[in-house]
Image (spheres, rainbow, N blue to C red):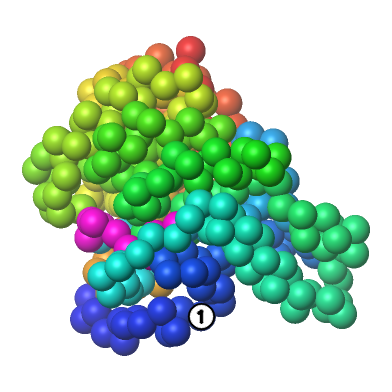
Amino acid sequence: MENEKGKTKTLSDLKGYQIVGNHSAVKTCLWLKKSLRDEGFCYKQKFYGITSHRCLQMTPALLCNLSCIHCWRPLDLMPPIKKWDEPDFIVEESVKAQQKLLSGFHGTDGVNKRKLKEAYSPNQAAISLIGEPTLYPRIDELIDEFKKRGFTTFLVTNGTNPNAVEKVEPSQLYISLTSYDEESNKKLQGKGWNEIVKSLKILAKKDCRTVIRLTLMRDINMKAEKFAKIIEKASPDYIEVKAYMHLGYSRYRLERDAMPEHHEIRIFSEELSKLIGYNIIDESEISRVILLERG
């Protein structure tokens, strides 16, 4: 196991990110780039019909309140925030930041010109880039601002802010789970288990489309019967069962062997589906993810 070193310390060290205002950021993802070259698209396009090349990947909070061992993003970036930016400012400047990033694709071999033109008018916001987005205190207003501009919105949260989970209404609301009880949560994420349980119960009452995303690590948390008990509290519309990927800063905390193969994710998903009555409806082998839908 490597020691954690070379840790990103300042916002200026973030490679490929466009910093927006005091605490937000935008980054073009791998699948947007692939889609522009007609080389494939994100599993979210396959599962839910969003368009990868028009997806704006962003965060309104470059900070996090957990220390998840599987996280591949850099942590502890932000100094104390003295002033939170307005939601309309964040949306407007995020679109401009995306356009600036896209400008580098002009003249690049293999780029689909039609898609590149369309990409300049994003219509889907993936609020999940880095950090915990619900730490932005006006996250509900931010989502409403995106909606006013014709965006669909996918919000991914760690569930430690149940008040925010209760008030937001994105197009699709994710709670990302790595642990299944208080003991595993302390080992894998650090804290916040009681708040996560509250958020899962709130999820069961939401009107928007709801998803639980499981991040699985071999020999660490691949226990379907344990997850089944906690998932039943939330009764999500969908479950994404996804392999941990040995990337970025997680390599300093986990061995490569912790990354399951796709067939292991399928075996886990089949066991889970039997335990809770969900049906396997789709999968993406390249992303090592399987989609289950409530029966």
The N terminus lies in quadrant? bottom left
Question: Under tag 1, what secondary structure?
Answer: loop
Q: Position of residue 228 (x, y in %)?
A: 28, 25
Q: Nearer the viewer, residue 77 or 272?
A: 77
Locate residue 99: give its quadrant: bottom right
Q: Position of residue 87 (x, y in %)?
A: 51, 52
Q: Nearer the viewer, residue 146 or 191?
A: 146
**Region in magenta:** 60-68
The residue shown at (67%, 66%) is 96
Q: Position of residue 287 (x, y in %)?
A: 54, 51
Q: Would you say residue 284 is visible in this rendering?
A: no
Q: Is residue 2 left or right of residue 136?
A: left
The residue shown at (48%, 42%) is 141
Q: Position of residue 255 (x, y in %)?
A: 29, 68
Residue type (three-letter) at the residue carrying disc 1: Lys
Q: Nearer the viewer, residue 193 or 133?
A: 133
Above or below, comparing residue 9 to residue 204 in the picture: below
According to the picture, the residue beneath numbered tag 1 turns out to be 15
Q: Is residue 101 left or right of residue 80?
A: right
Helix, strand or loop for the magenta stretch, by majority: loop
The crowding category of the residue bearing disc 1, from other C-alpha atoms within 10 Å (few below 14, some 14 to 19, many at least 20), is: few
